[in-house]
Image: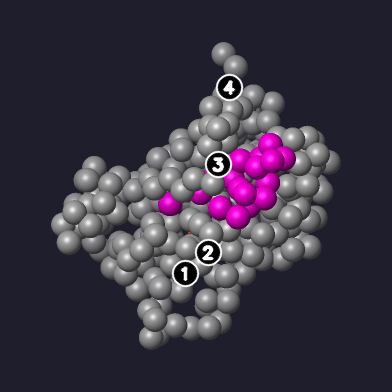
Amino acid sequence: MPGRIDGRVALVTGGSRGIGQAICRRLAREGAAVIVNYASQRGAADEVVDRIRGGGGRAMAFGADVADREAVRTMVEAAVHEYGPIDILVNNGGVLSRGTALTWDDAAFDRMIAVNVKGIVHTVQAIAPGMMARRYGRIVNISSIAGLGTATPETTPYATTKAAVIGLTKRQAFELGRHGITVNAICPGFIATEMLTALPEAAAQMGALAARAMLNRVGEPDDIAHVVLFLASDESSFMTAQVLTVDGGRTDFLSASA
Ligand code: NAP
């Protein structure tokens, strides 16, 4: 049976772990050749590639800090050389540091802006011109429910970067739509990855986090990967500039019980 994105080429930033590894595997299972980007954990990225190849898929790992414009350009050139033009770009790689409006740390915020926001600017600048030339492209930006409001406490600088991702998504969609490129964002709720479990109170309160979502559970990386696949496929061809919340009903649960 043909896959839903057979023959497409996809680049997933932060594809080595957590949500990104699930996205890489899901896209590969549906027929895409996948570039598994990582920042520092080469071994984790290699494992994702091995699993994809073991299942008969096509994948390669490529290290690049998305905050580094030149490193992104080099990665994209290598990817195009290996697999041909990129059809699908998933901007998933991200970092989180704690902070409130009062404990705000400028250095931590600058790093989050560089990775979470400028990283998306860099990949789009490197990849969108090729998509425009072929009048086809799917771009999916991973934001967060933190970017929508107050759902995650003590993450104010991070939430600010994730709100910026939503604004950036809409502007990119506006500017690229006439070239046949869709740009959408996903706002995951709490997903069981190292980013979440590294927050000490989150790890200790997994049950409480689950109880405050309508579906009564914390999400799994695959919960996000399925939605990315839809936005990366032709099934979503009339959707752009949209922000999909995938949080088990957490955001609405909080407003309902406020
Ligand atoms: P994670 O488990 O911490 O994994 C982060 C991934 O991003 C890793 O693959 C890491 O690569 C990569 N990365 C970090 N800095 C990078 C950089 N400078 N350049 C390229 N890649 C980089 O995080 P996750 O939970 O899967 O989060 C993935 C995305 O979802 C992030 O954008 C995050 O903000 C968002 N999100 C997560 C949750 C959640 O509850 N988990 C909720 C909402 C939104 P290495 O392996 O090399 O370090």
- The label nearer to you, 4 versus 1, is 1
Image x and y of residue 177, in percent: 65, 42
The amino acid marked with disc number 2 is Ala
Q: CA distance from mark 4 to mark 3?
A: 22 Å
Q: CA distance from mark 4 to mark 1?
A: 37 Å
Q: What range is drawn magenta here?
A: 170-187
Please give the name of the residue rendered at 38% of the width and 79% of the height, measured from the top-left corner.
100
Which residue is label 2 attached to? 164
Nearer-N-terminus badge (4/1): 4
Could you tell me if the residues under marks 2 and 1 are in contact, i.e. CB atoms within 8 Å? Answer: yes
Q: Residue at x 74, y 35 (%)?
A: 135
Asked if residue 178 is among those painted magenta in the image, a careful observer would answer yes
Q: Is residue 148 left or right of residue 22?
A: left
Q: What SS does tag 3 mark? A: loop
The residue sitting at the left extreme is 257
What number is the disc on residue 240? 3
Q: Amino acid at mark 3?
A: Thr
Residue at x 76% of width, y 41% of height: 132
Sequence-first tag of 4 and 3: 4
Q: Nearer the viewer, mark 1 or mark 3?
A: 3
Does 79 appear in magenta?
no
Please name the residue that numbered disc 4 is placed on: 3
Q: Which residue is mark 1?
A: 160
Q: Nearer the viewer, mark 2 or mark 3?
A: 3
